[in-house]
Image (cartoon, rainbow, N blue to C red):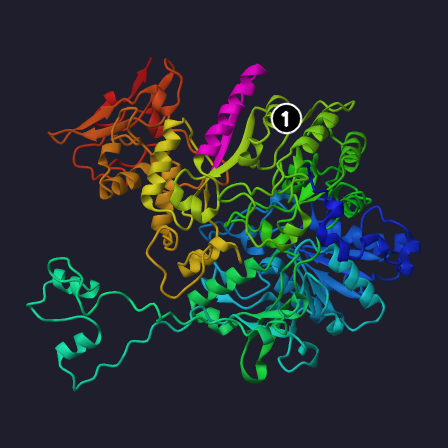
């Protein structure tokens, strides 16, 4: 059965969140919304704020928004907490809006890394921001955590700055920055914060807040788990640690002997046990080495090995064995390669990244230290072990706090609504959803959840979850009876964990489900099934959908769960993420093979049919991931067409800071194995890195093989790969030979989540042997159009007109000109009935 989070091995050493004596300001009570202005503070009777939180997101008082969770958690400890959301960073004045904080600043870039929030995977600036009212872009600066910290220091320079959030978590050591294409320093150094809290930081933040409130200098708070800070190399507080040097990757290899210039070639060969004589055939040399003559008889001078001659053995001195002790982990620190080393040496960068990921289990992780700077400017960035996970009781405490479950009133329109021009898309998405757990033990290399939330699952109790469903039903405006999600980072990891707390505390595996599901992992979905059934039985609840990503290799271990999910909690479509079909990229992603997907698909279709429902799986795939070859993407495209999938919005690999796949991308080394200077050219150690805009576009084009804009690029690539057999107009072909009337340019699907239809505007042409344009009429099913109601229009090339480079066609005629009879071959305008 499950090992409940309450009795986790890690929880025994942690001080409960509710055990602290409340700060004196608790007498002011609970605020309807944390104040964002002086007027709100005065209404609450406050003359000042104890803590002011600065965030790059709009303030939505909902437990899915990190700043709201942190603010309400601190409020429950008795502190007066104010929020400055999305301030104008051009000066320090907006940071003075609530006055000087009594204790410290809390700074975060928001729920996303600010660079990922603002730029696409192609480094193009986004025009939207889901965490801003009205979905308006540009409301936060690049590297927002650094900019906000600087402005806070400028506003009130003697107030401590505590940095947190996912941007701080993913940049806590020297990290590769995709947008500048270089390795940047730890954000602790760049932001000049006093303390960085990484991960879900409630436990660390509550302790730090009470210690600062007790007048303890922030520079002396260096022993809190889940924190990082700067320390001088000669600081006395850093003494007494056992330092493990991990600044290099290779021990010295075999040293070649110097050649004696006074020896002949034959003498040198003889000294090495070989020969260079022409008379010595390989067979006779082998026979001599084996001690036999040409007839296979044993040579008299080399009969039997001397039994008295034994190899030398080295054993530990028994007298010293009892004295050899491994230093305690809580006083051990691993010295990583310095910032200067990892900046100039991608191999050392890969090594440092691997060590960091090996030290992520709260049960056995050691502290890390990385030098930044040299000489008088030298500083050490210390990273304490990860925080102890929250127990179920603590998770309930955090999620049961007084959340208004909506945006701050200042964002409302003239009618007091948040549903129109001031809508916040990120809030709209989670408006009726419930977070039931934290963490993920999947370990996918492209994902940053493990680096931030950890791989230990932290689950809420059943009663707490049911209470939140009832609160949404009874209190949230606009609720129509449908809960949009019961999930978390992964929908079906609720209450799953290691069978043994002791094994869990000692484990160093990056994933519990790769290359297969660990024998010590519980896969019982019973508690989750019970919540689903109890939730959908509540009065006023019409349907509970599951919107979070599903780990299907775990789900197939529980057919009862799949049946419950498919028959009651799928709204027609279910999102899952096989990510790829080929073993090359899958091994670099640490994802299961496509066989697990096929097994889940069979169960999904079986239970859908039993329920009499027509439902579909929506698989997600990644293009251009490290370890992906052009042939891998071609095979994926063939699989997509064979299975009838036409991906609309596709995902290109995005190297987020500190992710394992990002280290592969930057270094070209497989950091899932021991990093060495000379890594073998094998599938396990070599990594095919997809760089350059053209190749990234090609991989993305394979995912969108059905988009005519991609056909010229795919034709060129398939011919170069020797797979021109995939070009043709039959069902067995990947792309056709004809080219519809398109602009031929690259078209991003992100903004509108759709592609311009080729039906109704795309009659294609080919050039016959006489050099004349011949109209092609594609099969209606190839354009996904209903037979009998398809219209094809186009303009044939006029004699003497130059064709465009991309499509071999003249520019499309649009507007009123398209309605007139074109010059040349007017028969191109046809109606297919």
Q: Nearer the viewer, residue 150 or 239?
A: 239
Residue 98: horizontal and vertical position, in percent? 79, 61
**In the image as oriented, which residue stretches furthest toward the right?**
27
Give the residue displayed 72% in from the left and 40% down from the top: 413
Residue 450 part of the magenta-drawn span: no
Image quarter where the C terminus lies is: top left
Is residue 612 inside the magenta stretch? yes
Q: Is residue 83 visible?
A: no
Number of numbered discs on residues: 1
Name the one closer to the observer, 467 or 693.
467
Q: Residue at x 37, y 44 (%)?
A: 699
Q: Is residue 304 placed above or below 797 in the rendered structure?
A: below
> Pointer 1: what residue?
569
Asked if residue 170 lies left or right of residue 221, the reply is left
Which region shows up in magenta?
595-620
Name the image quarter holding the N terminus.
top right
Q: Secondary structure at mark 1?
A: loop
Which residue shows up at 81% across the image and 67% down it? 212
Residue found at the very far left of the displayed protein? 279
**Residue 572: x %, y % from top left:** 56, 24
Q: Residue furthest bottom?
A: 262
Q: Nearer the viewer, residue 310 or 135?
A: 310
Q: Position of residue 612 (x, y in %)?
A: 57, 14
Image side of residue 74 versus residue 382, left or right: right
């Amino acid at each position: 059965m499950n090992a409940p989070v309450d009795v986790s091995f890690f929880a025994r050493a942690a001080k409960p969140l509710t055990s602290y004596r409340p700060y004196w300001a608790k007498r002011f009570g609970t605020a309807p919304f944390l104040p964002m202005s002086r007027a709100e503070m005065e209404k609450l009777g406050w003359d000042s704020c104890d803590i002011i939180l600065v965030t790059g997101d709009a303030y939505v008082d909902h437990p899915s928004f990190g700043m709201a969770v942190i603010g309400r958690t601190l409020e429950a400890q008795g502190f007066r907490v104010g929020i400055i959301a999305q301030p104008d960073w051009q000066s320090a004045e907006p940071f003075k809006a609530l006055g000087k904080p009594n204790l410290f600043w809390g700074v975060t870039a928001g729920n996303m890394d600010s660079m990922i929030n603002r730029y696409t995977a192609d480094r193009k600036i986004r025009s939207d921001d889901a965490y801003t009212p009205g979905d308006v872009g540009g409301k936060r600066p690049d590297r927002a955590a650094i900019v906000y910290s600087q402005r806070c220091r400028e506003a009130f320079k003697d107030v401590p700055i505590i940095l947190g959030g996912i941007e701080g978590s993913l940049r806590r050591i020297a990290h590769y920055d995709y947008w500048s294409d270089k390795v940047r320093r730890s954000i602790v150094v760049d932001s000049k914060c006093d303390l960085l809290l990484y991960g879900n930081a409630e436990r660390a933040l509550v302790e730090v807040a009470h210690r600062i409130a007790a007048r303890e200098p922030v520079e002396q708070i260096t022993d809190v788990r889940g924190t990082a800070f700067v320390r001088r190399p000669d600081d006395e507080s850093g003494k007494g640690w056992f330092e493990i040097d991990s600044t290099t990757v290779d021990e010295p290899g075999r040293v070649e002997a110097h050649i004696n210039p006074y020896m002949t070639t034959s003498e040198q060969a003889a000294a090495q046990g070989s020969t260079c004589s022409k008379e010595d055939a390989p067979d006779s040399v082998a026979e001599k080495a084996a001690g036999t003559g040409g007839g296979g008889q044993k040579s008299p001078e080399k009969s039997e090995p001397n039994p008295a001659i034994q190899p030398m053995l080295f054993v530990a001195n028994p007298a010293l064995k009892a004295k050899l002790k491994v230093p305690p982990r809580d006083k051990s620190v691993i010295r990583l390669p310095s910032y200067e080393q990892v900046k100039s040496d991608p191999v050392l960068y890969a090594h440092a990244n691997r060590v960091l990921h090996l030290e992520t289990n709260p049960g056995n992780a050691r502290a890390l230290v990385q030098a930044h700077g040299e000489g008088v400017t030298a500083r050490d960035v210390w990273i304490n072990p990860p925080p102890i996970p929250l127990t179920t009781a603590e998770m309930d405490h955090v999620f049961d706090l007084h959340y208004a479950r909506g945006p701050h009133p200042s964002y409302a329109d003239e009618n007091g609504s948040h549903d129109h021009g001031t809508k916040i898309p990120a809030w709209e998405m989670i408006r009726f959803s419930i977070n039931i757990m934290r963490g993920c033990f999947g370990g996918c290399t492209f994902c940053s959840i493990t680096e931030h939330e950890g791989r230990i699952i932290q689950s809420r109790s059943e009663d707490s979850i049911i209470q939140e469903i009832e609160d949404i039903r009874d209190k949230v405006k606009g609720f129509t009876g449908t809960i949009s999600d019961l999930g978390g980072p992964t929908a079906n990891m609720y209450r799953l964990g290691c069978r043994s707390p002791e094994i869990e505390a000692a484990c160093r595996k990056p994933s519990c489900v790769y290359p297969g599901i660990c024998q010590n992992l519980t896969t019982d979905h019973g508690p989750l099934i019970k919540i689903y059934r109890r939730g959908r039985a509540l009065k006023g609840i019409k349907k509970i959908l599951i919107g979070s990503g599903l780990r299907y290799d775990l789900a197939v271990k529980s057919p009862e769960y799949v049946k419950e999910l498919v028959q009651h909690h799928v709204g027609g479509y279910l999102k899952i993420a096989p990510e790829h079909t080929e073993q090359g990229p899958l091994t670099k992603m640490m994802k299961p093979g496509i066989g697990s997907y096929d097994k889940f698909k069979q169960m999904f279709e079986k239970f859908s049919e039993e329920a009499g429902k027509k439902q579909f799986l929506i698989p997600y795939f990644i293009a251009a991931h490290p370890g992906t070859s052009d042939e891998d993407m071609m095979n994926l495209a063939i699989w997509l067409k064979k299975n009838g999938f036409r991906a609309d919005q596709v995902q290109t690999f995005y190297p987020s800071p500190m992710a394992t796949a990002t280290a592969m991308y930057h270094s070209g080394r497989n950091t899932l194995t021991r990093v060495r200077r000379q890594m073998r050219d094998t599938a396990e150690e070599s990594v095919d890195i997809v760089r350059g805009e053209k190749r990234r576009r090609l991989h993305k084009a394979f995912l969108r093989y059905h988009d005519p804009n991609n056909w010229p690029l795919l034709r060129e690539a398939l011919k170069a790969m020797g797979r021109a057999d995939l070009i043709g107009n039959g069902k067995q072909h990947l792309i056709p030979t004809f080219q519809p009337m398109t602009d031929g340019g690259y078209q991003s699907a992100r903004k509108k989540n759709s592609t311009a239809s080729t039906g109704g505007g795309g009659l294609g042409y080919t050039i016959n042997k006489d050099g004349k344009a011949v109209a092609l009429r594609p099969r209606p099913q190839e354009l996904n159009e209903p037979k009998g109601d398809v219209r094809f229009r186009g303009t044939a090339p006029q004699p003497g007109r130059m064709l465009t480079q991309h499509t071999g066609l003249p520019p499309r005629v649009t507007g009123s000109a398209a309605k007139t009879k074109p010059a040349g071959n007017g028969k191109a305008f046809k109606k297919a009935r």
